[in-house]
Amino acid sequence: AQKVTQAQTEISVVEKEDVTLDCVYETRDTTYYLFWYKQPPSGELVFLIRRNSFDEQNEISGRYSWNFQKSTSSFNFTITASQVVDSAVYFCALRGDSNYQLIWGAGTKLIIKP
Amino acid sequence: EPEVTQTPSHQVTQMGQEVILRCVPISNHLYFYWYRQILGQKVEFLVSFYNNEISEKSEIFDDQFSVERPDGSNFTLKIRSTKLEDSAMYFCASSGRDTRGEKLFFGSGTQLSVL
């Protein structure tokens, strides 16, 4: 069975603080893909990153960085120097190579206070 | 950046009525999907579509649901007889592949309200 766990329901930090959103996944597929999406209050799902299981290099994009640890089945997301515009619900998702559907975590609501 | 386009953005319907939600996937993508999100809950997979047929569907996608790609650009989701519990945000998605694997993009969603 495939599963994605985002244990943090809601995180609230003050602007300019760093914040890490946790994601733990379960899958039996040897090849799989991990995704992070941002859902701002307007409701759309914004693609942030896609990571393959066979590519363990961590990635940085501006203030965003992702730490993929296959040994602990985690794919955590860090925002450095957070800004109010980062306030949103963030979803982690998994797709195994044996099927087509994305399995979603419950999401973490991130609140950045000015 | 190419986009997945969904229309309408909001749809209000009476219980028992048929609705059709429309999507224009990214033009060179080959895989198409519908997901839904009931207010405040996680995103749920409905169906995937490839090579003009359903490749996978969830338990939610029962006989009341159908998908179609009527021409080379549109991808539609039809709900034959809507129920109150069908009220949700419906997201269309499409994916293509590059050397690093699949990239999956979502439309802005259609908010369906069944009264």
Image (cartoon, coloured by chain):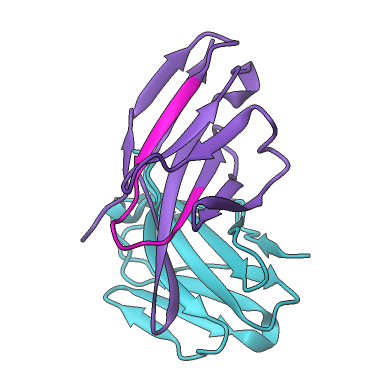
Chain colours: A cyan, B purple
Up/down of A76 relative to B1, above or below: below
Instruction: Count all numbered tags in the image, as a single digit.
Output: 0
| Residue B21 within the segment the image draws in magenta | yes
Residue A6 in which image quadrant: bottom right
Which of B66/A41 is in front? Answer: B66
From the top left corner, tell me how far across and down residue B75 is, in percent.
41, 42
Main SS of the magenta segment?
A: strand
State the image quarter where residue B21 is shown.
top left
Q: Is residue A69 highlighted in magenta?
A: no
The residue at 48%/36% (across/down) is B90
* Spot occupied by residue A97 in the image (x, y as percentages of width and height): 62, 74
- Span shown in magenta: B19-33
The quadrant of the rendering that contains the C terminus of chain B is: top right
Vertical position of residue B89 compared to residue A36: above or below? above
Q: Estimate the x, y position of residue A86 in percent, counting from the top left.
A: 33, 56
State whether residue A57 is above or below residue B107. below
Q: Position of residue B5 (x, y in %)?
A: 30, 43
Q: Is residue A3 left or right of residue A61?
A: right
The residue furthest right is A1
Q: Residue at x 23, y 58 (%)?
A: B2
Q: For this view, does A86 lie left or right of residue A4?
A: left
Evaluate whether residue B108 shows in this view.
Answer: no
Q: At 52% across and 90% down in the image, what residue appears? A: A56
